[in-house]
Image (tube, grey):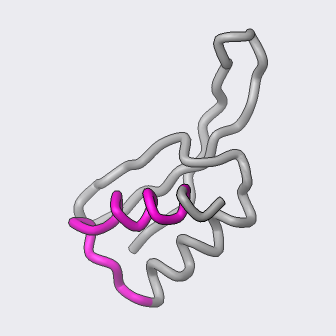
Amino acid sequence: MYNLIHINYTSDDNINYIGYGIHETESNLIINDITTDKARLEQLVDTMNRLQVSPIHARDVVDDFLAAI
């Protein structure tokens, strides 16, 4: 199961922001700092859970997500 995670970051320009990522609980796969758009990443996480995306393909799915925004 995929879950949304968040971490506080500081950019190179000293700007603080919250970066959202995903955590897959069975394999303990973590992909940090995918986007700052929580709502869009929640939709992706919901879709990945509904379609039961294998952790092996999670990074490809995230790459496709980023290419589309």
Q: Nearer the viewer, residue 58 or 2?
A: 58
Q: What is the x, y in percent for residue 38? A: 72, 57
Q: What is the x, y in percent for residue 22? A: 48, 56
Please tell me whether the stretch drawn in magenta is mainly helix, strand or loop: helix
**Residue 9 as seen in the image, left or right of residue 14:** left
The image quarter containing residue 54 is bottom left
Count all numbered tags in the image, as a single digit: 0
Q: Check the image and report above or below for 13 versus 56.
A: above
Locate the N terminus by quadrant.
bottom left
Locate the C terminus by quadrant.
bottom right
Residue most toward the right? 15
Q: Nearer the viewer, residue 55 or 27?
A: 55
**Residue 61 as seen in the image, left or right of residue 18:** left
**Residue 26 as seen in the image, left or right of residue 38:** left
- The residue that appears at 57% across and 72% down in the rendered structure is 44
Q: Nearer the viewer, residue 56 or 66?
A: 66
Residue most toward the front? 67
Q: What is the x, y in percent for residue 37? A: 73, 54
- The residue that appears at 70% across and 46% down in the rendered structure is 36
Start-end of magenta stretch? 51-66
- The residue that appears at 45% across and 78% down in the rendered structure is 48
Is residue 59 magenta-colored?
yes
The image quarter containing residue 8 is top right
Is residue 19 magenta-colored?
no
